[in-house]
Amino acid sequence: MQDIAEQLQAWHASGRSFAVATVVGVSGSAPRDPGAALAVDAAGEAVGSVSGGCVEGAVYELCLAAIESGEPVLERFGYSDEDAFAVGLTCGGVLDVFVQPVVPGADAGLDAGLARIAAGTPVALARVVEGPAALVGACLAVTAGEAFGALSTGPSTVGALERAVVAEARAMLDAGRTGRVVLGLDGRPCDEQGRGTVTVFVESSVPAPRMIVFGAIDFAAAVVRIGRFLGYRVTVCDARPVFATARRFPDADEVVVDWPHRYLDSQLGRIDGRTVLCVLTHDAKFDIPLLERALRLPVGYVGAMGSRRTHRERQAKLREAGLSDAELARLRSPIGLDLGSRTPEETAVSVAAEIVAHRRGGSCLPLSAGNGPIHHDLATPAKEPAGSRSPHAA
């Protein structure tokens, strides 16, 4: 929903009713992740996507029906071998789509959630997508310190359940996670097959993850561009003011002139498990104090450019600085996958591919080399890449 929040807020501010269809569950080779959304207003205008085209028409019609009826609906879409032209996903995946009508001013949770998503304020939108009819569609907007809305406006409201949903949503917001939570009506965790349960879809809307590129070199400019393309907020940092300029890096969100390790120390409150650090300086006086800190931080990815000889020398110096084998194992060096890259742009693709594979748990093998699922479970630990290389010779 975050991708279409600006348009939703515009509809909401004008008092226009609309419906939002959100992917709340996927399996197999489904084309979009949970949280992908398509919205349709009362005039029939549509924004967003839930499937990349496979089932857009059917979801569009569900949205129009929800606007008219005022009732939410959970629909499952999957491929049918009997009729490949039937509504479904010809890629073989399954999508669970929750369609919710929205009337501005009618739901405090939705109103607060949409406003905060559009404003870029961290918020978790928790919506009941399965359970007792009186609860389906109920919404809570949860921030780090407040909660807005209610699971039910009637006497059936269960305080324990609401407190449990707020706690789950707050924990998922803190981790930047989106997904489903199944709870008993008493608020206790339970098996999905249990009776008397509610399924809550929690959608975390958080600021874009950060990519910090250390080293204002020609390869950095290409990494910055592809980092922006992947949705990161990108910072370039270099201690040399002649190279670290906005003119040289127009695609960066910010360019900082500072010693890399000193800048990283100043950012401890602004980095998290989604943060990517790309160390491209290829200079020990910058690299060693920076990596000594970076490999001890709970960031998502740390990669460093250099030849294999540079990597061995770098490892030795980091061991001398006191880093453990476990900490050193976190370092992706030489940075990137073995694509045979030579140009800055090709190298940027190599680096981006490794970042995506590390984040998503990809094998880094050609898809044609296997017959398993194309999309990996987000909980799957990242595997080691098939190889790595350096665009530089030392």
Image (cartoon, rainbow, N blue to C red):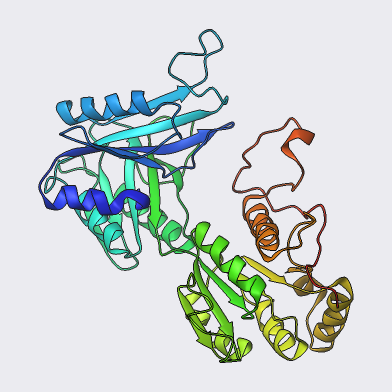
Residue 272: x percent and y percent?
A: 53, 70
Residue 109: x percent and y percent?
A: 22, 51
Q: Determine whether 66 is above or below 260 in the image.
A: above
Q: Determine whether 70 is above or below 310 in the image.
A: above
Task: Classify residue 172 as left or right of residue 149.
Answer: right
Q: How many badges with numbers are in the image? A: 0
Task: Classify residue 184 as left or right of residue 308.
Answer: left
Q: Determine whether 46 is above or below 116 in the image.
A: above
Task: Classify residue 146 as left or right of residue 192.
Answer: left
Question: Residue drawn 23% across and 58% down?
Answer: 115
Q: Quadrant for residue 196, please give it.
A: top left
* Residue 83 appears in the rendering: yes
* Residue 109 appears in the rendering: no
Residue 178: x percent and y percent?
A: 45, 50
Question: Residue drawn 79% across and 56% down?
Answer: 338
Q: Residue furthest top?
A: 82
Q: Quadrant for residue 99, please give it.
A: top left
Residue 299: x percent and y percent?
A: 60, 70
Question: Residue drawn 12% across and 43% down?
Answer: 16
